[in-house]
């Protein structure tokens, strides 16, 4: 297996070991979880990431009024990314994530959490399980 495929699979596994935290539960029937941090999983400075997320927020404001801040964290809490739970179609969320160079998005529907590849080719959407087991207030 070449180095690129190994890196891609390693990233995909990391994306699966996640929790989400927010002040309240998102009230949307189905929604995406989007961030603009670390495009293509290349770690940027905190300042650059904040600027990117502000740009994403401005796009969200133009598209919908149904969004809220949510925090994505690794299980060991070594990695955190401020994000947004957004009531958009999966297609709209996918396009926005691609615009902000994100490898993947999270999609929640019928209390199921899905990991959806955006820029990672050759990887299929993965059902991670019950949304309620990944979400904390």
Image (cartoon, rainbow, N blue to C red):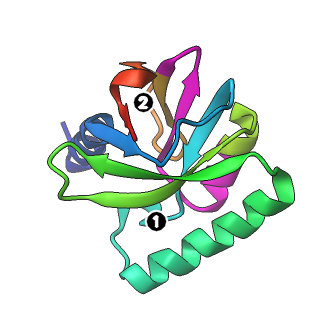
Residue 63 seen: yes
Q: Quadrant of residue 78?
A: bottom left
Is residue 27 left or right of 16 when viewed as pictured? Answer: right
Crowd tier of the residue under label 1, counting other residues whose Cα lies within 10 Å: few below 14, some 14–19, many 20 or above: many
Mark pair 2, 1: CA separation = 21 Å
The image's mark for residue 85 is: none
Residue found 44% across the figure and 23% down from its top: 131
Residue found 30% across the figure and 50% down from its top: 73
Q: Secondary structure at mark 2?
A: loop
Instruction: Indicate which disc, 2 or 1, sits on the residue closer to the N terminus.
Output: 1
Above or below — where is 33 with respect to 52? above
Instruction: Give coordinates of residue 123: x percent, y percent.
Output: 42, 30
Above or below — where is 1 with respect to 61? above
From the viewer's side, name the closer residue of 50 and 21.
21
Residue found 49% across the figure and 18% down from its top: 112
Residue denoted by label 1: 37
From the viewer's side, name the closer residue of 96 and 85.
85
Q: Quadrant of the C terminus?
A: top left
Is residue 33 left or right of 115 when viewed as pictured? Answer: right
Q: Secondary structure at mark 1?
A: loop
Queried whether the magenta region covers residue 54, the answer comes back as no
The image's mark for residue 123 is: 2
């Amino acid at each position: 297996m070449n180095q690129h495929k190994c890196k891609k699979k390693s990233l995909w596994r990391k994306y699966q070991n996640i929790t989400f935290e927010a002040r309240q539960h998102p009230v949307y029937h189905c929604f995406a979880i989007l961030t603009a941090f670390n495009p293509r999983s290349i770690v940027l400075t905190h300042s650059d990431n904040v600027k990117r997320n502000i740009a994403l927020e401005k796009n969200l404001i133009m598209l919908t009024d149904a969004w809220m801040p949510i925090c994505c964290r690794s299980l060991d809490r070594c990695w955190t990314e401020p994000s947004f739970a957004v009531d958009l179609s999966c297609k709209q969320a996918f396009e926005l994530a691609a615009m902000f160079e994100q490898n993947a998005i999270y999609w929640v529907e019928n209390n199921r959490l899905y990991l959806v590849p955006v820029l990672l080719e050759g990887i299929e959407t993965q059902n991670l399980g019950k949304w309620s087991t990944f979400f904390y207030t």
